[in-house]
Amino acid sequence: MKNRLNELTKQIDAALDFYLPAADNDQKIIYEAMRYSVFAGGKRLRPILMLECAKMCGGSVEEVMPFACAMEMIHTYSLIHDDLPAMDNDDLRRGMPTSHKKFGEANAILAGDALLTRAFEVAASAKTDPAVTVRAISMLAASAGTEGMIGGQILDIQSEGKKIKLAELKNIHLLKTGAIIRSACTIGAIAAGMNEAYIKTLDDFGTNLGIAFQIRDDILDVEGETAALGKTVGSDASLEKNTYVRLLGLERSKDLVEEYSDRAKAALAKFKKKADFLTELTDYLINRIN
């Protein structure tokens, strides 16, 4: 699994390097800041999910790659902004100084903005059927916007220091983390020309994987180590964020990771042997240490 993930990461990184070339002009600082965060490491989970879902559905990796890179740019922009003093105020990201620590707050904000806008420019360059391109871009925008990631972040901020119900927490994570993961899976299916039933199946897979992934993230913020995670452990507690561990305790949270990952794998059953990699990837992700 690690070897396969490394191969996919190299493939994605080469494409990102193409879409985000270094610049030597008056604006070089913004390109440097963009590339710094994009190439600071990371699992490339979302683009890998998109590429592998497309491949499983018989689609072309080359055709899907612009959407996959666009999604990684959107994800990276969100991390840059999450780390800002006005948000989570983190000093480390992927074991390196956060963007605002390296380049200053203004440049970090602009680097995030630049990655977000560049993402849609890259997605629009895809060589897929125009109707597919428009639908994929629409899904990217929706999953990153107020009905997706941004909406979840707003609810997350509003819930800090408050006692909320489990259903409210699940909704936060379905939006903040899950929406992007779901659209990674469904865009892969759409680009491959799958029918609505299969797209719905991969939406179910992405939904359950997204929840399992987030709960595991909550657990790692308690049990993990800063060196392995590449970010400060215990930041959720210091910000009084609502997490599955805080609401349900560590053991019940671990049980839920297993339950949601089982649901994710069950959704892949109709793909049979073609889903072997995604099934193994699900197990790998819920047992990760970073």
Image (cartoon, grey):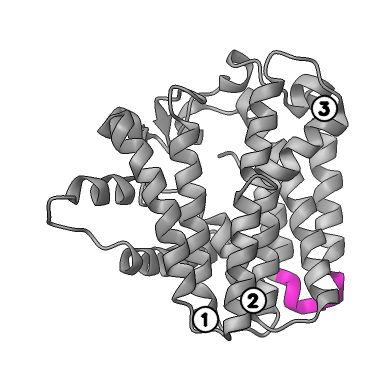
Q: What is the three-letter code of the residue carrying label 1?
A: Glu
Asked if residue 60 is among those painted magenta in the image, a careful observer would answer: no
Pointer 3 residue: 251
Q: Residue at x 63, y 81 (%)?
A: 131
| Circle 1 residue | 63
Side of 25 where 36 appears, left or right: right
In which quadrant of the rendered view does residue 265 lie?
A: bottom right
Relative placement, left or right, of 213 versus 140 is right
Q: Who is closer to the viewer here, 103 or 134?
A: 134
Query: Mark 2 — residue?
Result: 54
Q: Is residue 266 left or right of residue 38?
A: right
Q: Secondary structure at mark 1?
A: helix
Give the Cα separation between the discs numbered 2 and 1: 9 Å
Q: Residue at x 69, y 40 (%)?
A: 214
> Relative to 168, is 112 on the left or the right?
left
Nearer-the-camera pick, 54 or 129: 129
> If you read the primary sequence from the N terminus, does the residue marked by circle 2 or circle 3 appear first?
2
Can the viewer see residue 6 in this picture?
Answer: no
Residue 236: percent from left, percent from top: 61, 22
**Which of the two labelled residues, at mark 3 and mark 1, occupies the earlier sequence position?**
1
Marks 2,1: beta carbons within 8 A: yes
Q: Most prominent secondary structure in the magenta stretch? A: helix
Q: Which residues are drawn in magenta?
A: 268-276
- Tell me if mark 2 has few (under 14), some (14-19) or many (20+) residues whose alpha carbon lies within 10 angstroms of its own: many
Looking at numbered disc 3 in the image, what kind of residue is underneath it?
Answer: Glu
Q: In the displayed structure, would residue 282 be above or below residue 224?
A: below
